[in-house]
Amino acid sequence: MKNSPCPDCSAEVKIPEDAVDGEIVVCPDCGLELQVKKDPAGNTELAQVTKEREDWGE
């Protein structure tokens, strides 16, 4: 497993070796959902998952 820091709380987040691009992992400390991003060179980073909400014309 590879570790990467959480962008919110800096805790170590474990990324499974077999994680695929787009997979969601959760920070064990703050509970933030993070998306695994892999580039063609095989480097892995985490990005915060943003959830779209309905605005209902507000």
Image (cartoon, helix red, strand yellow):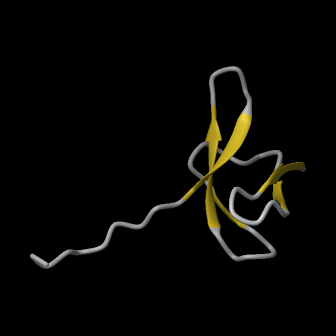
58, 20: nearer the viewer = 58
Q: Position of residue 14 (x, y in %)?
A: 84, 58
Q: Is residue 48 left or right of residue 16?
A: left
Residue drawn at the location 63% of the way across and 22% of the way down: 40
Of all residues shown, which one is farthest toward the left? 57
Picture coordinates of residue 1, whole percent (x, y): 90, 50
**Horizontal and vertical percent position of residue 15:** 80, 53
Query: Which of the 4 image quarters holds residue 38?
Result: top right
Residue nearest the observer in this picture, 24 or 46: 46
Q: Is residue 55 left or right of residue 43?
A: left
Q: Residue 55 appears at what percent x and percent y? A: 20, 75
Q: Residue at x 14, y 78 (%)?
A: 58
**Relative depth, front residue between 57 and 25:** 57
Q: Quadrant of residue 27?
A: bottom right
**Residue occupying the point 74% across, 30% down:** 43
Is 17 positioned to the left or the right of 40 in the image? Answer: right
